Image (cartoon, helix red, strand yellow):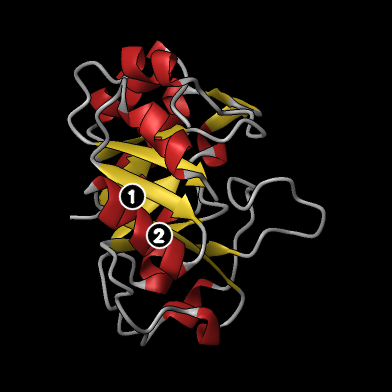
Amino acid sequence: MIRVKICGINDPAARDAALGGGADWLGFVFFPPSPRAVTPTLAAALAAGVPSRVGLFVTPTDAQVAAVLAVLRLDVLQVYDTAERCAALRARFGVPVWRAVGIAAAADLPTTAEGLDGFVIEAHPPAGATRPGGNAVAFDWSVLRGWVAPLPWLLAGGLTPANVAAAIRAAAAPAVDVSSGVERAKGQKDPDLIRAFIAAARAA
């Protein structure tokens, strides 16, 4: 069964829709430039009853990660940084780490486990972007065909309820990750789109 992560949870309605739809992971963004960013305190309130919690960080310091973990249990750190830095965070905090990898061609795909636990594969951010992910940008999913993934991985970037099934088939993806594709406005999740996305992914 295709596994699903709903990222950028920032209000109770989005949380409830994701949980009710059967999402496997809920993601909380700890990167202030993002319109989906939450404080550790708000994330802790929203995460009550959430079984699998992913915290998204962009080039974080140890202190930034520690500040979140002090108030919120996270099951996974999703990190935008180098492989070496991601491995260091894993060693420092003892929490599984997924490294987010932006790709443009098959040559960009990871070929070793890098001492990590998973990868989130998405498009390179467009020129002028202020965020490394969550930019609603898709890429040629077919470049993933034939890739021997060294770790479990999720497909992300530009996914919506309308295209997620095609993306899963094109990329042979075992799991998908969505944020902007289930929003009615930037940073505002739509519960109906969340439920539709999960249903479409599971039916693929």
Say which quadrant the C terminus sits in: bottom left
Q: Is residue 38 visible?
A: yes
Task: State the image coordinates of residue 203 (x, y, percent, origin top left).
Answer: 27, 50
Residues tagged 1 and 2 counted as in contact (Cβ below 8 A)? no
Dot placed on the residue nearer the N-terminal end, 1 or 2: 2
Q: Is residue 204 visible?
A: no
Task: State the image coordinates of residue 18 (x, y, percent, origin top left).
Answer: 32, 28
Q: Quadrant of residue 17?
A: top left
Q: Quadrant of residue 146?
A: bottom left
Relative depth, front residue between 54 and 61: 61
Most extreme residue toward the right, as rendered?
A: 128
Task: State the image coordinates of residue 149 (x, y, percent, origin top left).
Answer: 30, 78
Q: Residue at position x 56%, y 28% from top?
A: 36
Q: Which residue is mark 1?
A: 201
Q: Which residue is mark 2?
A: 86
* Residue type indicated by callout 1: Ala
Relative depth, front residue between 161 and 130: 130
Relative depth, front residue between 188 and 44: 44
Note whether 115 is above or below 202 in the view shown: below
Q: Residue at position x 57%, y 38% from top?
A: 180
Say which quadrant the N terminus sits in: bottom left
Query: Which mark is nearer the camera, 1 or 2?
Result: 2
* Residue type indicated by callout 2: Cys
Q: Secondary structure at mark 2?
A: helix
Task: State the image coordinates of residue 13 (x, y, percent, origin top left).
Answer: 40, 13
Q: Secondary structure at mark 1?
A: helix
The label shown at residue 10 is: none
Q: Residue at position x 33%, y 74% from top?
A: 114
User: How many C-alpha atoms fall within 10 Å of the one at disc 1: few (<14), some, or many (≥20)?
Assistant: many
Note whether 126 is above or below 177 in the view shown: below
Query: What is the spatial separation of the Cα atoms under label 1 and label 2, in whole angstroms?
Result: 28 Å
Q: Residue at position x 33%, y 66% from top?
A: 173
